[in-house]
Image (cartoon, rainbow, N blue to C red):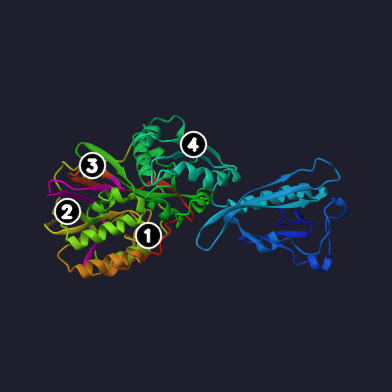
Amino acid sequence: MPLPDSIVGYTQADGVRVRLLLEDRFLLIDHAQMYSSQQSLGCLSSISCVSAPSTEILQQNSIIYFNVLWAELLPSTLQSQPAVLTIDYCKVKNDKKATLDRVSFLIDVQNERACEAWIENLLKRSYRNTIRNKRLFVLINPFGGQGTAMTRYKKYSAPILAAARCRVEEIETKYRGHAAEIIENMEGLEQNYDAIVCCSGDGIPHEVFNGLSKRTNAATAFKMPVCQLPCGSGNALCLNLVGSNDLSFATLSVVKGIPISVDLCSLTQDNKRYITFLSQALGMIADCDLGTENMRWMGESRFTVGLIMRVLAGAKYPCRVSVRILHESRTQIRQVYQEHKNNQYIYTSAHTQLPDLKYGTVHDPVPEDWKSIDSSSLAVFYVGKMPWMSSDALFFPAALPRDGYLDMVLIDSSIPKKEIFTILLGVAEGKHFDSKYLHYYKVDAYRIEPKAHSGYISIDGESFNFAPFQVELHTGLGTMLSRTGEFQAPGI
């Protein structure tokens, strides 16, 4: 028997009759008949009968399904009193800022059973591509950003998760590496939770992926979706998955998030193997990421300010880059982007451990088919797996979740400073992609060997030893929760 797509109720504030219609994309609160029928709750309650709809309903006459968190019917305790239908949802503005809200309607006693079926229809539509009542393991970094993660989580995220009837376990991390330890050693992770939520900057997701890599069933563990509530100074993961760094909207997107398969990378340095999900940098980008800790109070702006300072100083970073380039012309890259744009690659493996390294480690000989670049004047070495590195840096506009490629950008300090600034100004909208003064490659493995004695290497925004390292990509190894099932970027 099909579920009903409409139900008649009355506004709780003033008892005015409304029809609640389930349209293709939204719930419509229809009060078009109210002025002609003058029908109200009448003798079913003591609420006064009025002919105009409440201000609340006039202001919000439709709710898209994505914004609906929950609905339930509170049955009448007395035969003479109506039941109460409540709908919890988020009001979302055009700038992707969300606020929690609720609308309530009175339902005639004889319509309670029909209303229960209507609620089921509403929730099916509202959670069409994901699951309800998500079981979430929330890792909160109280030290990230400006140290307000717990306060902001309690104020903006927890109420939305509660309204969506999510089952939540919260743990505060105590020290660097704590999140990785928790994830590595947790029993029943896959059985007890539907997603790992990082209330932090990008450091905790980095730890989570590395914790997953050390579990005895690593390949299976990587199917656990990872997502972020933006509470750090760098929140690139959330920006790429959600399209906003508004904490409330990000929380709504976790509730409604769709699991997607994503590429991850192995990085070897010294005698260790790590997982990297976001970026690797040496040169100006790493300096601005890690050498501006004294400017952390500025938030994301510290990266821009630091970059300007280094361009003006003519900073150089001598190194040797060996890389397996798969596509290097912009025409090829655009073609590959279109081919892989809708790729739904899902990782499957007969193994329970991490994939083997196809190209060995940083200590092995460089494969003969790799291209080697010796540079004494490199300014920017930046490799990314996601488009946005910050809200004003669409550094890798051709990046896709699971295309099997890393995007590599190389900029030499020998080009005119004016051109470097033009490139950097274009990064905000991805316009630098077409600049003839930078190299933009699609690669799947590389090694970089710095020639200086000291400096910064940034991996997912985290500081690593200033020493050679090698990276190779694993197609579709990881899983994340995305708002729409893809990265939130304009593309090329």
Residue 39 lies left or right of residue 227; in this view the side is: right
> Is label 3 in contact with label 4 (beta carbons under 8 Å)?
no
The residue lying at 34 percent from left, 34 percent from top is 214
> Is label 2 in contact with label 4 (beta carbons under 8 Å)?
no
User: Which numbered dot is residue 170?
Assistant: 4
Quadrant into which the C terminus falls:
bottom left
Q: CA distance from mark 3 to mark 4?
A: 32 Å
* Among numbered discs 2 and 4, the one appearing first in the sequence: 4
Place of residue 158 in the rendered image (x, y in percent of width and height, measured from the top left): 54, 43
Residue corresponding to mark 2: 321
Any part of residue 351 in sight: no
Residue corresponding to mark 3: 268
Which residue is more in the foreground, 355 or 152?
152
- The quadrant where residue 268 appears: top left
Q: CA distance from mark 3 to mark 1?
A: 28 Å
Q: CA distance from mark 4 to mark 1?
A: 37 Å
Which residue is more in the foreground, 33 or 35?
35
> Is label 3 in contact with label 2 (beta carbons under 8 Å)?
no
Q: Which residues are magenta?
A: 437-462
Depth check, mark 2 against mark 4: the one in front is 4
Place of residue 202 in the rendered image (x, y in percent of width and height, measured from the top left): 37, 47
Q: CA distance from mark 3 to mark 2?
A: 15 Å
* Among numbered discs 3 and 4, the one appearing first in the sequence: 4
Depth check, mark 3 against mark 4: the one in front is 4
Disc 4 marks which amino acid? Glu
